[in-house]
Image: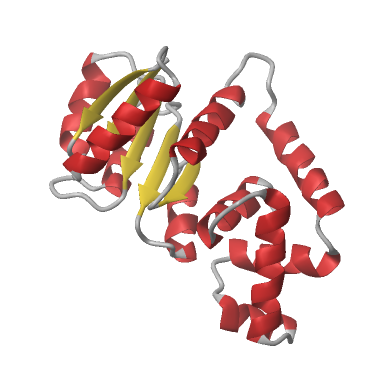
Amino acid sequence: MRLLLVDDERLLLASVTRALRLERPDWIVATAPDGIEALRLLRSTQVDLLISDVQMPAMDGMALLRAVRLDPELAKLPLILISARDDRSAIRTGMASGADDYLTKPFSTEELILAVESRLRRLEPGVDNSAQAVALWAELKEVLTEREWEVLAQIGLGLVTKDIAATLKLSPKTVSVHRQNIMGKLDLHNAAALAALAIRASIT
């Protein structure tokens, strides 16, 4: 399996590449410092999955995402965005523009591997992505309380704690407790991961 990791932070590229090669020695990991170099590599070599930072010079991750989705040869390439911005509106923009997943920095090697393997499983022959969304929706319905479900839906819409509290007529502290409970039940570690999950499950 061939990955292309795109980020202008050289230390991050080196550390993530080293960790992935250690944990998944059968993966081939190539790197690029910006979107321009990434596009050149994508058009000249075989890549199975693209992982790109959002904020980069020359061509940022959103511009790279648009270029990939507009290229007939690359349009179906799985793409995971990474960003230091724990911003739900940015997550929704990225997912709505065609990103398959969204991770916020700092992320662990385990989180990245889980995101990659989850995306690749959805590409296996015979896998129905719409059916997977329905199954995820049903699983979340079973695990979460009605109030937690409502909070997760609001997170997926890009609302922050005070806005969720106002919408659901709860205190900000209660919303925070619900969010922590949801994260504990789903083994997620930040609001960005919750928002991406809500969008994938079509909760919003």
Outermost residue, front direction?
22
Is residue 7 at least partly visible in the picture?
A: no
Left or right, residue 156 beside residue 47: right
- Which residue lies at the image location 43% right of the left edge and 47% below the top edge? 107
Q: Is residue 161 above or below residue 5?
A: below
Q: Quadrant of residue 7?
A: top left
Q: Is residue 177 above or below residue 111?
A: below
Q: Position of residue 135 (x, y in %)?
A: 78, 38
Q: Is residue 68 above or below residue 190?
A: above
Q: Position of residue 44 (x, y in %)?
A: 22, 15
Count of marks overlaid on the render: 0
- Which residue lies at the image location 50% right of the left edge and 40% below the top edge? 111
Q: Quadrant of residue 34?
A: top left
Q: Quadrant of residue 27?
A: top left
Left or right, residue 122 beside residue 60: right
- Of 148 and 11, which appears nearest the observer? 11
Is residue 127 at least partly visible in the picture?
A: yes
> How is the rendered protein coloured?
secondary structure
- Which residue lies at the image location 37% right of the left edge and 61% below the top edge? 85
- Of 36 and 80, which appears nearest the observer? 80
Outermost residue, left direction?
58
Left or right, residue 89 beside residue 58: right
The quadrant in which the N terminus is found is: top left
Q: Position of residue 189 (x, y in %)?
A: 56, 55
- Which residue lies at the image location 81% right of the left edge and 58% below the top edge? 144
The quadrant in which the C terminus is found is: bottom right
- Of 198 and 104, which appears nearest the observer? 104
Q: Position of residue 50 (x, y in %)?
A: 37, 30
